[in-house]
Image: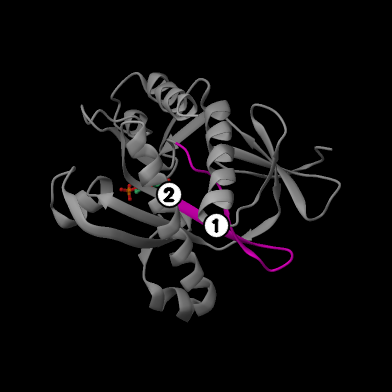
Amino acid sequence: MKLEQMYEGKAKKVFATDNPDECIVSYKDDATAFNGLKKGTIRGKGEINNRLTNYFMKKLEEEAGVPTHFIEELSPTDTLVKKVRIVPLEVIVRNVIAGSLSKRLGAPEGTELKCPVLEFCYKDDELGDPMVNDYHILAMGWTDKETLEKIKEYAFKVNDYLKNFFSKIGIDLIDFKLEFGITSGGELVLADEISPDTCRFWDSKTKEKLDKDRFRRDLGDVEGAYQEIIKRVFSHE
Ligand code: TMP
């Protein structure tokens, strides 16, 4: 079923299958930060990110009305997904100031935002994923107006769903990054992953960081943070 490798990214590999409309995503333990400048391994990350992503993609389809690329989990690290053409945008939603927004606005991390903030970055490693707005996106033809509006609608739906979910397991959803794709049938779907690599999770009480910032900032016990997230998510059921 798993045919030739089509693509290798920083955290995942993508393989062709015998169905031209489907592919297999294989999650790696490799971790990078700062556009690949910092490299490492987070033991068990591939399995954790695969299982968490699939869990949330299923929930988002069933309970939040957000279509996704997810088809079927094949193994602890491999998942069958719809083949998509990725819209070249990183779609970021923020509830609390952290990371690059803290630097950009000169406001301390942890500052509450009065309402969620939506940002777009153009996916281009050579350019360092520059922040862009609706005008750049439409003028460059990266997607059309109707699709862009749908992306925004889905991004806020994902935020509402995840924020509520994580609040019940004692975690503040600070911010996260999504990617969307277009299937061979022309449907806009949520793609990529939802994991501690792509979200900031802080313990609600202690504000301890339980995400990839532990790797980015050398805070120690990176594996423990990923394990804590999966333990709390699955003990919720
Ligand atoms: P930022 O504060 O560094 O802009 O990150 C915002 C969110 O996006 C945070 O949850 C981490 C996530 N993110 C990625 O998933 N991939 C990236 O390459 C970067 C820079 C951030």
Q: Is residue 91 left or right of residue 1?
A: left
Residue at 16% x, 47% y: name it: 111
Question: What is the three-letter code of the residue carrying label 1?
Answer: Val
Residue contact at pointers 2 and 1, CB within 8 angstroms: yes
Residue at 35% x, 35% y: name it: 168
Q: Position of residue 65 (x, y in %)?
A: 55, 57
Q: Is residue 86 left or right of residue 214?
A: right
Q: Position of residue 103 (x, y in %)?
A: 19, 50
Residue at 53% x, 34% y: name it: 52
Q: Nearer the viewer, residue 198 or 126?
A: 198
| Classed neighbour count for the residue bearing mark 1: other residues with Cα under 10 Å, few (<14), some (14–19), many (≥20) | many
* Disc marking residue 66: 1
Alpha carbon distance from label 2 to label 1: 10 Å
Residue labelled with disc 2 = 161
User: Where are the magenta residues, as a range?
Assistant: 177-195
Tag 1's secondary structure?
loop
- Is the residue 197 above or below the residue 188 in the image? above
For the question of whether residue 144 can be seen, the reply is: no
For the question of whether residue 183 can be seen, the reply is: yes
Q: Nearer the viewer, residue 49 or 131?
A: 49
